Image (cartoon, rainbow, N blue to C red):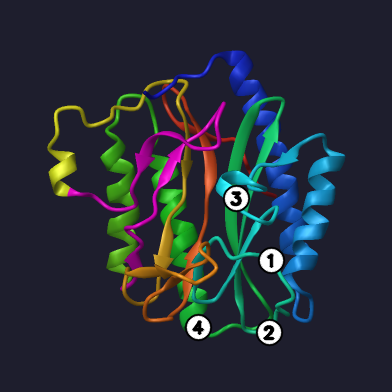
Amino acid sequence: MIKCKSPREIELIRQAGAIVAGALNLAAALAKPGITTKSLDDAVVKYIHEKGGKAAFKGYRGYPANICVSVNEEVVHGIPDKRILKAGDIVSVDIGVGYQGYYADAALTVPLAKISPEAQQLVEVTRESLRRAINKIRAGIKLSEISAAIQGFVESNGFSVVRDLVGHGIGSALHEDPQIPNYVDKTVARLEDNVILKEGMVLAIEPMVNQGTYEVETLANGWTVVTRDRKLSAHFEHTILVKEDKGEILTSIN
């Protein structure tokens, strides 16, 4: 069931989103060649706790870290560890925060020093696909219009959208209905119960875009999802409130 949030619930999600945004800003500033992904995790969780939040990913279905840090061919769920970042890497940081029983979630991909033109284009296309999806959002549209906006822009630029992982509703739980694919399944789009957005819904929109094939696989650690062809992947995400005439970003990053 898709829940429309009350004004009180939206305010608490907004406060969680402000902590997420601050944490992502911190992670982006700290992500430099020579540091470990674990040091990002340590700094971010310290910030989240100082702001009165909790790291929502820690322990979720057994996830062992506070944030996800996915490097290069890693799509999502990279586990922070002793890996040292280096110039030319692209680093996707995904952060979820719980605050007084409500949640927000966002992600970005950070280029380290000088990256290849191809990697730069991948990052820019992924970021732009999210912007285009958000610009579509308003009460009364079909959920599939968001998916189509992402897929159309990504594929017109020669990249692919991951199909095994999707965005989601969010609010009193980290993951709620509906699932939000980054592509249009024509069979699903024809169903009469295709989701129509309503004012008060809160959605986590998160295009995951690959340089090569959309196919992915999970490493032996049981968490880290990588591209099957080991080409690069990028990831951007925001938590969005559906309003009558637009979508409002609740995890806006300076």
How far apart are the two marked residues, 2 and 3, measured between alpha carbons? 31 Å
Mark 1: few, some, or many residues within 10 Å (few <14, many ≥20)? many
Task: Specify the segment rendered in magenta.
Answer: 158-185
**Answer yes or no: do the residues labelled 2 and 1 have beta carbons within 8 Å?**
no
| Residue wearing tag 1 | 80
Q: Earlier in the sequence, mark 2 or mark 1?
A: 1
The disc, 2 or 4, on the residue closer to the chain's N-terminal end is 2
Rounded to the nearest whole Å, what is the CA distance between mark 2 and mark 4? Answer: 14 Å
How far across and down, in percent of the image, does residue 63 sit? Answer: 61, 53
**Which residue is at a point 63% across and 15% down the rendered structure image?**
8
* Residue indicated by mark 4: 117
Q: Which mark is residue 62?
A: 3
Name the element at disc 1.
Answer: loop
Discs 2/3, front: 3
Look at 18% across and 40% down and name the residue there: 189
Compare marks 3 and 4 and give the one earlier in the sequence.
Answer: 3
Estimate how packed mark 3 is, as few (under 14), some (14 to 19) or many (20 or more) residues with alpha carbons within 10 Å: few
Query: Residue 248's mark?
Result: none
